[in-house]
Image (spheres, rainbow, N blue to C red):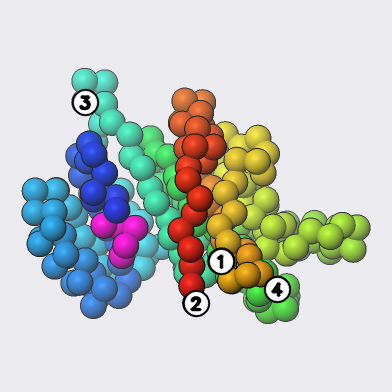
């Protein structure tokens, strides 16, 4: 919820905000905070799993025209990989002029659960990536390099976004967020995707000029 409130606090603000939340209690808490701290912001609330409600999300986005231009910015913040389906990303990308900022749970979920996700009967990452081709790639290369499973799946996801015509050039455009515990443990990657070179330029400037990350104490 902190990230949603930060988005509401940007200056200048977005014209409209659409929040999709699976947990009814969390959605109620968000509504209450928005009403208290951002009463003038125009917000739409959708209760349910974003993968089930993607058509409702698309309907809630304003219809842009040549005279009413706009860009949709989508922040995807899953707790684990199974929380977001690649088919949902595809549908949003097909129907909207949209940029994505994605949290890829590379280490806090994917790397930690390699033993589960690589089982043939576990389709979590097939759904997350929208393909099962990663399996043969991983089996072919896992012993040829020291790449962590979380990094491997992150790069596979970026390649999948590139297949939708989003700009992706190298892993240098990814931001790895770590937990400050003395061991500096990696948590997740942040990845920005746009079809416009200007958007990528802004993202690169952002990660280059951002101050040191906040400390995560668990």
Residue 49 located left or right of residue 188 = left
- Contact between marks 2 and 1 (CB within 8 A): the answer is yes
Mark-to-mark CA distance, 2 and 4: 22 Å
User: In 3D space, how far apart are the residues under numbered discs 3 and 1 (Cα atoms)?
Assistant: 43 Å
Q: Reading the chain from its start, which is encountered first: label 3 or label 1?
A: 3
Q: Earlier in the sequence, mark 3 or mark 4?
A: 3
Tell me the crowding category of disc 1: few under 14, some 14 to 19, or many 20 or more residues within 10 angstroms, Cα based: some
Please identify, in this view, whether the residue under mark 3 or under mark 4 is nearer the observer. 4
Quick one: label 2, few (<14), some, or many (20+) residues within 10 Å? few
- Of the numbered discs 1 and 4, the one sitting upstream in the chain is 4
Q: Which residue is mark 2?
A: 218
Q: Which mark is residue 114?
A: 4
Q: Residue at x 43, y 56 (%)?
A: 76
> Which residue was labeled with disc 1?
179
Image quarter of the N terminus: bottom left
The mark that comes first in sequence, 2 or 1, is 1
Using the rendered image of the protein, determine whether residue 37 is visible from the camera's viewpoint.
Answer: yes
The percent position of residue 73, horizontal first and vertical second, equals 36, 42
Residue 195 at least partly seen: no
Q: Residue at x 38, y 48 (%)?
A: 74
In this rendering, the answer to whether 128 lies above or below 170 is below
Q: Is residue 135 left or right of residue 62?
A: right
Instruction: Say which mark, if any, is on residue 68.
Output: 3
Q: Earlier in the sequence, mark 2 or mark 3?
A: 3
Q: Secondary structure at mark 1?
A: strand
Rendering coords of residue 66 (x, y %): 26, 21
Q: CA distance from mark 1 to mark 4?
A: 20 Å
* Mark 4 crowdedness (10 Å alpha carbons): few <14, some 14-19, many ≥20: some
């Amino acid at each position: 919820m902190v990230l949603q409130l930060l988005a509401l606090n940007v200056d200048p603000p977005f014209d409209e905000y659409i929040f999709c939340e699976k947990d009814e209690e969390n959605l109620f808490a968000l509504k209450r905070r928005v009403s208290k701290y951002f009463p003038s912001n125009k917000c739409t609330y959708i209760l349910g799993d974003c993968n089930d409600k993607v058509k409702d999300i698309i309907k809630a986005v304003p219809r842009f025209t040549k005279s009413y231009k706009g860009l949709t910015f989508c922040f995807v913040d899953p707790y684990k990989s199974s929380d977001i389906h690649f088919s949902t990303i595809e549908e949003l990308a097909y129907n909207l002029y949209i940029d994505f900022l994605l949290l890829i749970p590379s280490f806090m979920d994917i790397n930690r659960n390699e033993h589960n996700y690589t089982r043939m009967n576990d389709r979590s990452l097939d759904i997350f990536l929208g393909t099962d081709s990663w399996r043969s790639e991983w089996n072919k290369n896992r012993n040829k390099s020291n790449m962590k499973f979380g990094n491997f799946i992150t790069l596979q996801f970026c390649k999948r976004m590139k297949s939708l015509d989003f700009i992706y050039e190298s892993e240098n455009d990814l931001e790895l967020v770590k937990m400050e515990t003395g061991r500096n443990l990696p948590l997740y990657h942040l990845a920005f995707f746009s079809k416009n070179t200007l958007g990528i330029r802004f993202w690169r400037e952002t990660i280059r000029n951002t101050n040191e990350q906040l400390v995560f104490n668990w």
